[in-house]
Amino acid sequence: MSIQIYSPTLAVGPVWTDPMNILASDNAYAILAFGQIQYLIGMNYGIVGAGVINQVEVGVEQYDNLDMAPFASIDVSWDGGTSWSALAHPVTQKPADDNAVEWLDVTADTIWDWDKLSDVNFQARLLVNAKAATAGSYYVDWLPVRITWTPGKARIRSNIYAPWLRYHRHG
């Protein structure tokens, strides 16, 4: 089994301060002020591979000092942001920066293949609802992706009957 962690190379968050700060775990933060509901999207992870994908996880390194507990969750897109997973993966609230990544398993969100994980298709999205808060901010340091796979060629199964594909012995 192989495990690889990938960082986004692009981030979009319209009302976030410094959304590009989620590209690395470096204590530089994308910041969402209180009273907001907003998405922060990581893109262009540079994921490539061959073999059977066993697990896909999105990590988030974050904390908040909001006066009301926010709701935060992760979801993913495998078609360039046209659609998003139906499952919301809640993020644990942290009142201080512990520099720990919380890994959220998104494996069951679709049947993963390497094309769905390509830069054209894969996006990770963090939704933060801090609408009820009247003071404080939500801080995100890093939004990585961790892929676990079994190296080798991906197996393609087919139940197609093709009588012309018979073994012929020559000689």
Image: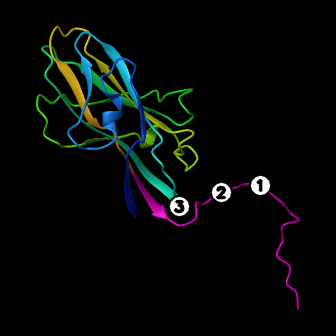
Q: What numbered label is drawn on residue 157?
A: 2
Query: Residue flagged by tag 1: what amino acid is it?
Result: Ile
Query: Residue flagged by tag 3: what amino acid is it?
Result: Gly
> To which residue does mark 3 refer?
51
> To which residue does mark 1 refer?
160
Q: Residue at x 65, y 57 (%)?
A: 157
Q: CA distance from mark 1 to mark 2?
A: 9 Å
The x and y percentages for residue 29 are 24, 32
Q: CA distance from mark 2 to mark 3?
A: 14 Å
Q: Earlier in the sequence, mark 2 or mark 3?
A: 3
Residue 37 in which image quadrant? top left
Q: Tell us which disc is closer to us: 2 or 3.
A: 3
- Label 1 secondary element: loop
Q: CA distance from mark 3 to mark 1?
A: 22 Å
Q: Tell us which disc is closer to us: 3 or 1.
A: 3
Which span of residues is magenta-colored?
147-171
> In the displayed structure, would residue 29 be above or below residue 58?
above
The x and y percentages for residue 120 are 57, 40
Q: Residue at x 56, y 33 (%)?
A: 80
User: Is there a contact, CB below 8 Å, between mark 1 and mark 2?
Assistant: no
From the viewer's perspective, is 128 left or right of 98? right
Query: Residue flagged by tag 2: what amino acid is it?
Result: Arg
- Label 2 secondary element: loop
Q: Main secondary structure of the magenta part?
A: loop
Q: Residue at x 25, y 15 (%)?
A: 130
Q: Residues within 10 Å of mark 2 (few under 14, many from 20)?
A: few
Q: Locate the C terminus by quadrant.
A: bottom right
Q: Residues within 10 Å of mark 1 (few under 14, many from 20)?
A: few
- Label 3 secondary element: strand
